[in-house]
Image: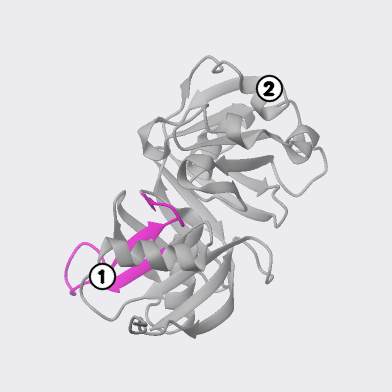
């Protein structure tokens, strides 16, 4: 079985967010235990598993995502990575429809090599900052929003880009603020190539800091579109690896555009027999 590591939301290897991608030849997924074991072995923030669906249905591929600790309901970078593998291996061209736990998601390939994902927009609900937020982050929040059950994270606005970049949070304390994770954001510094900056921490699903988070941008896009008065924006996720996500807000749908690079193409061997 072929297994690939793809760096998503970047045009250079060893940047962006790496995802494992396994395209299955069967018409069903293996056991959840096996999927979880493979994801734990790959040990990236997400590993995507996809299998083809019969022609004529509402989707072309079934898609699931696993962190090293659990299955998640929505993942942008691993979807982009999967679409990239489908395109570069000739398994699909143009528009691809994925059946997922978040409904049917699509990816559309462009001539310049970029891919656009069509994801549901996250609802933003203003909430008081949970107790201990400033101490956990090491920075004072300007505003706090619940991203609702769609992605289940806490979105925290900070003072400026420098504060986001230099943040050194207490990860144990962050785990007490949200069941899943915390996204921090600020407006981009003047003169940059992006409109806003972010970082994302997901201790609730076993990911200390995610390098570039597509799902987070389904909340960042409506947040910053409302602030900046524009539906089309560029976000930079300022992790150590970094990556750009172009967003286009269309009401209850958010389009996420980026590029990807395959860095490892290998073989997942059959499970060896137990040693007695």
Q: Say if residue 59 shows up in the picture.
A: yes
Vertical position of residue 116 compared to residue 263: above or below: above
Task: Determine the CA span between mark 2 and mark 1.
Answer: 43 Å
Q: Quadrant of the C terminus?
A: bottom left
The magenta stretch spans residue 108: no
In the rendering, at what x and y percent does residue 145 appear?
A: 51, 24
Q: In which quarter of the image is residue 169?
A: top right
Q: Which of marks 2 and 1 is nearer the N terminus?
A: 1
Name which residue lies at 69% across and 54% down. Answer: 242
Q: What stretch is highlighted in magenta?
A: 48-72
Residue 14, located in which quarter of the rendered image? bottom right
Q: In this view, does 95 lie above or below 273?
A: above
Name the residue that disc number 1 marks. 30
Q: Badge 1 local density, few (<14 within 10 Å), some, or many (20+)?
A: few
Give residue 41's mark: none
Position of residue 248 in the picture relative to residue 274 (left or right): right
In x, y percent, where is residue 190?
Answer: 81, 38
- Disc 2 residue crowd, few under 14, some 14–19, many 20+, Cα 10 Å: few
Determine the secondary structure under disc 1. Answer: loop
Q: In this view, does 24 lie to the left or right of 186?
A: left
Is the Cβ of the residue at disc 2 closer than 8 Å to that at disc 1?
Answer: no
The residue that disc 2 covers is: 135
Above or below: residue 31 compared with residue 176: below
Q: In which quarter of the image is residue 139?
A: top right
Task: Give the percent coordinates (x, y) of residue 121.
Answer: 42, 40
* Residue appearing at x 42%, y 35% in the figure: 152
Taking depth in this image into account, of 100 and 182 the one nearest to the observer is 182
* Colouring chosen for the image of the structure: one colour
Q: Quadrant of the N terminus?
A: bottom left
Residue sitting farthest toward the front: 276
């Amino acid at each position: 079985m072929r297994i690939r590591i793809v760096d998503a939301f970047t045009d250079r290897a060893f940047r962006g967010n790496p995802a494992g991608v396994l395209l299955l030849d069967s018409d069903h997924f293996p056991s959840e235990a096996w999927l979880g074991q493979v994801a734990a072995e790959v040990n990236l923030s997400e590993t995507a598993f996809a299998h083809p669906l019969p022609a004529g249905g509402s989707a072309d591929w079934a898609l699931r995502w696993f962190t090293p600790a659990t299955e998640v309901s929505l993942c942008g970078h691993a979807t982009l990575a999967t679409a990239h593998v489908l395109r570069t291996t000739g398994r699909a061209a143009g528009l691809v429809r994925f059946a997922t736990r978040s409904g049917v998601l699509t990816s559309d390939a462009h001539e310049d090599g970029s891919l656009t994902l069509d994801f549901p927009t996250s609802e933003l609900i203003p909430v008081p900052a949970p107790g201990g937020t400033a101490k956990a982050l090491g920075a004072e929040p300007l505003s706090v929003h619940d991203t609702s059950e769609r992605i289940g994270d806490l979105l925290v606005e900070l003072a400026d880009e420098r504060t986001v970049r230099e943040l050194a949070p207490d990860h144990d304390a962050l785990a007490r603020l949200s069941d899943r994770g915390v996204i921090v954001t600020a407006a981009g510094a003047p003169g940059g190539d992006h409109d806003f900056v972010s970082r994302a921490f997901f201790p609730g699903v076993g990911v200390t800091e995610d390098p570039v988070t597509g799902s987070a941008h389904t909340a960042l896009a409506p947040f910053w579109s409302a602030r900046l008065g524009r539906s089309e924006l560029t976000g930079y996720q300022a992790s150590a690896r970094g990556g750009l996500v172009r967003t286009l807000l269309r009401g209850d749908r958010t389009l996420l555009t980026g590029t990807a690079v395959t860095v490892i193409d290998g073989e997942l061997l059959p499970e060896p027999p137990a040693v007695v």
